[in-house]
Image (cartoon, grey):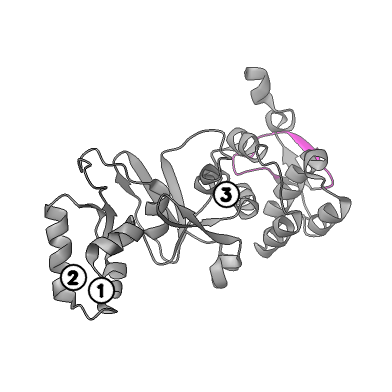
Amino acid sequence: MRSLDFFDTHPVFRHAEFLEARAAHGRSVHTSNNLLARHLKAGRLLRVRRGLYAVVPRGVDPVRASVDPYLVASHVADPAVVAYHAALQFFGKAHSVWRRFHYLTHNRTRPFSFRGLEFVGVQAPVAVRSQPDWGGGVVEVEHAGGRVRVTTLERALVDVLDEPPRGGGWEEIWRSLEMIEYCDLEAVVAYALALNSALTVARVGFFLEQRREPWMVEEVHLEALRAHAPVQPRYLDSTRQPGRLIPRWNLIVPEYVLHRGWEEAA
């Protein structure tokens, strides 16, 4: 395979991917590394970080070349999956546009920045860490000339409720999730239960109750969650803000969230 042919189908790629593709056609590691160095010097490639490259389109100044952040986030490690708020944003369901992109990966990694964008690796929740695709709900989508691995909207919904800071806090989470027109409720319930967290189950159940009519949430979905809700009252998050106890979920919800105080502020 010629290097330019590889670049045409891999707008963002790892060093190992390039070597593997070249080795399949009998090219040596030494030759392939020399080619990468030549293309970098010629401005045909950008080094995003060590071992990760982006292709500069023909005729574009490397300084001005844009690099798709979702391709970066899903290729920065093997494997890597765009997740949390970044997944919602990928599907156009984020209330606010962020320049921070979370991605799931096996190992702890240091965040890094590239051209004003921040990329943060996150290990999957412990309960699903050893499972294929970290519990499922991962899809591969053609995007910007390449392919992006990203969590489904159903998984992203549960993930941001499980880790609210990675969803932007309650206002951002509520406003973002309410942009979703349709949800596979069975998938939401199954993944929420798989995380083995009573607090997360309660958060998901409480949110689904708010979406009963638009999402056609049925009692069977709520009952499946309610059976695993906390036995004792729990605060909505670690800030332990006072609020109203929602008995069916044993969840203490701040009035600001319960009554959507952000709408009043607007």
Vertical arrangement, residue 57 with respect to residue 64, above or below: below
Marking on residue 22: 1
* Residue 181 vertical placement versus 13 (above, below): above
The secondary structure making up most of the magenta span is: loop
Label placed on residue 6:
none
Q: Residues within 10 Å of mark 2 (few under 14, many from 20)?
A: some
Amino acid carrying mark 2 in the image = Ser
- Asked whether the beta carbons under mark 1 and mark 2 sit within 8 Å of each other, the answer is yes
Check contact, mark 3 vs mark 2: CB within 8 A. no
Q: Residues within 10 Å of mark 3 (few under 14, many from 20)?
A: some
Q: Is residue 219 left or right of residue 207?
A: right
Q: Is residue 59 visible?
A: yes
Q: Is residue 51 visible?
A: no
Of 180 and 84, which appears nearest the observer?
A: 180
Look at mark 3 in the image and give the residue it sits on.
163
Magenta segment boundaries in residue numbering: 235-248
Asked if residue 157 is positioned above or below residue 31 in the image, the reply reads above
For numbered disc 1, what is the local secondary structure?
helix
